[in-house]
Image: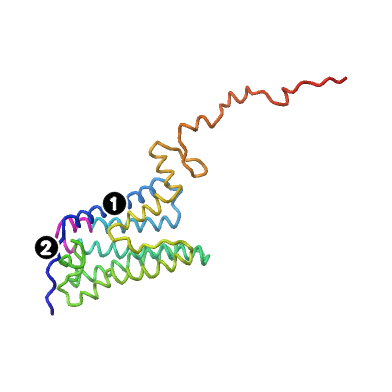
């Protein structure tokens, strides 16, 4: 068996960029979770699926953050734990992303009815398959120190494993490639060009926050309203609170306005 490559040197700037990306992903995922919890009227089925995607992205970003901050130099218990959590969360994130695309395709393009059965299927696949892969990888001692040769400071597949290439595919890369191939096709069919290719693994939560919070008019308006700067009107557009009093006439004043019909001069009958 050939000896693995020596550890790849990581510069402080690279670590800083990855840590900042993880923090933004955590912030974005947390914001998505908060909007789902605060406003029940926005809990549609697509946003319910987005909730589970946000949970997976949050766990993924936290595990990557710990891995880069810890700066592992060998296979230890926390290295294996961090590698297992990141493997499970990242793989689950790809499955939930494809589940959302498939749900939109079935409801918009196919017009097929969706119910609790489809949601249960999504749960079984998006949580169950990553869990089985992660448990198998840990049990067979495939998760461990990778010398930052295939990561940026965190632990993943142990480079000492003979079949490491196979486990790199099973624990992430094959599902990542499948998502990058499937997502553009599905979103083109439903005329929604949402392509996640090019968005790094550490910024998934932030990207979802931009698309589904900051770029969503209703959610954006409610966030502005919660900051006490704007009010949320019936049309979904935010408007300044100070102008609300000027736009609505005082009922007492409206009662004193004379009727135009009553102010007409009476014509002489002669």
Q: Quadrant of residue 200?
A: bottom left
**Residue at 29% in and 51% down:** 24
Residue at image x 24%, y 73%? 167
Majority secondary structure of magenta residues: helix
Q: Which residues are magenta?
A: 64-81
Q: Position of residue 139 (x, y in %)?
A: 20, 70
Q: Secondary structure at mark 2?
A: loop
Q: Residue at x 81, y 21 (%)?
A: 267
Which is nearer the N-term, disc 1 or disc 2?
A: 1
Q: Residue furthest right?
A: 270
**Label 1 crowd bin: few (<14), some (14–19), many (20+), radius 10 Å:** many
Image: 239 above or below 106: above
Image quarter for residue 128?
bottom left
SS at circle 1: helix
Label of residue 68 in the image = none
Q: Residue at x 39, y 54 (%)?
A: 211
Judge whether residue 58 is colored magenta: no
Labels in figure, total: 2
Q: Give the labeled residue for mark 1.
A: 24
- Front in this rendered view, residue 171 or 267: 267
Q: Is residue 43 above or below residue 77?
A: above
Which quadrant is home to the N terminus?
bottom left
* Placement of the C terminus among the 4 image quadrants: top right
Q: Is residue 104 left or right of residue 7?
A: right
Residue 161, percent across and down?
Answer: 17, 74
Q: CA distance from mark 1 to mark 2?
A: 26 Å
Q: Residue 28: image x %, image y %?
A: 33, 51
Name the spot of residue 122 as percent of width and height, x first: 39, 65
* Residue of label 2: 73
Residue most extreme to the bottom? 1
Label 2: how many residues lie within 10 Å, few (<14), some (14-19) or many (20+)?
A: some
Q: Are marks 1 and 2 in contact (CB under 8 Å)?
A: no
């Amino acid at each position: 068996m050939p000896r693995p490559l020596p550890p790849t040197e990581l510069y402080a700037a690279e670590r800083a960029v990855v840590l900042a990306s993880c923090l933004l992903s955590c912030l974005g995922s947390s914001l998505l979770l908060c909007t789902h919890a605060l406003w029940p009227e926005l809990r549609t089925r697509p946003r319910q699926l987005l909730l589970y995607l946000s949970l997976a992205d949050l766990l993924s970003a936290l595990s990557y953050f710990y891995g880069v901050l810890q700066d592992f130099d060998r296979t230890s218990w926390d290295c294996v734990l961090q590698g297992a959590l990141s493997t499970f969360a990242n793989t689950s994130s790809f499955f939930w992303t494809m589940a959302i695309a498939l749900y939109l395709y079935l409801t918009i393009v196919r017009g097929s009815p969706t119910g609790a059965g489809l949601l249960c299927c999504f749960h079984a696949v998006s949580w169950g398959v990553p869990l089985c892969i992660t448990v198998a990888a840990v049990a067979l001692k495939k998760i461990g120190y990778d010398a930052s040769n295939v990561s940026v400071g965190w632990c993943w597949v142990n480079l000492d494993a003979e079949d490491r290439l196979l486990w790199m595919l099973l624990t992430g890369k094959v599902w990542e490639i499948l998502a990058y191939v499937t997502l553009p096709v599905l979103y083109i069919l439903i005329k929604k060009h949402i392509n996640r290719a090019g968005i790094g693994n550490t910024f998934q939560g932030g990207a979802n926050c931009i698309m589904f919070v900051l770029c969503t008019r209703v959610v954006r308006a409610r966030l502005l309203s919660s900051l006490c700067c704007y009010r949320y009107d019936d049309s979904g557009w935010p408007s300044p609170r100070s102008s609300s009093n000027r736009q609505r006439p005082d009922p007492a004043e409206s009662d004193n306005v004379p009727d135009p019909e009553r102010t007409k001069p009476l014509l002489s009958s002669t």
